[in-house]
Amino acid sequence: MLLPIPSRRGETKEIYPRVTKKFPGIKEEDLTETLPSGPNKWQNRIQWVRQALLTKGEISSPSRGVWAITDKGRLRVKTKEPSSPTLNFGDIYDDYKASFQSYLLGKLNELDPHQFELFVGKILQAYGFKDVQVTGKTADGGIDGHGRLRLGLATINAAFQCKRWQGNVPRPEIDKFRGAIQGQFEQGIFFTTSDFSSQATEVSVVKGAVPIILINGKQLVDLMIQNEIGVQRDPVFIYYERASDFIEVE
């Protein structure tokens, strides 16, 4: 899904209707359907496609609530035109991967909070964490679970927090999580389906304080794909001409 506007930028309220017009078969019930957590499902899917385009550098966000197409995005639109040359396999694969990553992010956001916490627990187990427990408490400063990771001769006790978030996770969320685990755990891991603000990233590792590893939506989906958690991977065969077999033999 490309940014379907002729100008270089537009506000969210302008873009949603323009995107929807590109899908004439969409029904009214599709537009009003909501996720179990409350947000509108159709708008949520547009947000995840936006995130994929941001990651690929085809659009930018110059200010809050504004989408702007980049030179790279315009080039992609141009190469999609009928008169343009056929895309090579690498281009097709990049588009497919970005689309699938966006789809996975959408599926994660459809989980209810406890389901998301359990899913993150599976990710940690795949990476070698032992005794992973999902607590899902509400009055613990955001500790959703914990586990142990063996590193050489040492074992690290780590706590994790999960947030299905639309905008960037701000610094106060990181500070609050660190305060909850200080003195109990040696490390914190913060998972979100969106991303982190620059200030949140800056304070994730502070001298003398418990380090907080930040895992954003893209990284979370990459972990799913790498470990085949919620994902099935099938091999794809690519065929090339072997020119040497076509050489005339006297």
Image (cartoon, rainbow, N blue to C red):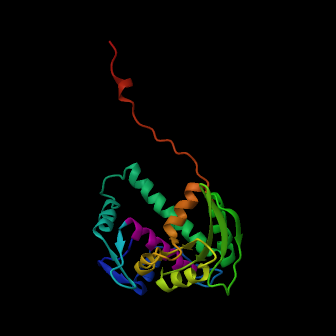
Residue drawn where x is 49% and y is 63% of the image:
99
Quadrant the N terminus occupies: bottom left
Residue 34 at what x, y percent from top left?
61, 82
Residue drawn where x is 52% and y is 83% of the image:
175
Q: Nearer the viewer, residue 37 or 215?
A: 215
The answer to whether residue 166 is above or below residue 95 is below
The answer to whether residue 208 is above or below residue 73 is below
Q: Report the span colored magenta.
A: 40-56
Q: Is residue 143 magenta?
A: no
Residue 32 at what x, y percent from top left?
59, 84
The answer to whether residue 202 is left or right of residue 175 is left
Q: Is residue 41 magenta?
A: yes
Answer yes or no: is residue 31 visible.
no
Residue 40 at what x, y percent from top left?
57, 83
Residue drawn where x is 61% and y is 54% of the image:
232
The answer to whether residue 150 is above or below residue 200 is above
Residue 27 at what x, y percent from top left?
57, 78
The answer to whether residue 183 is above or below residue 219 is below
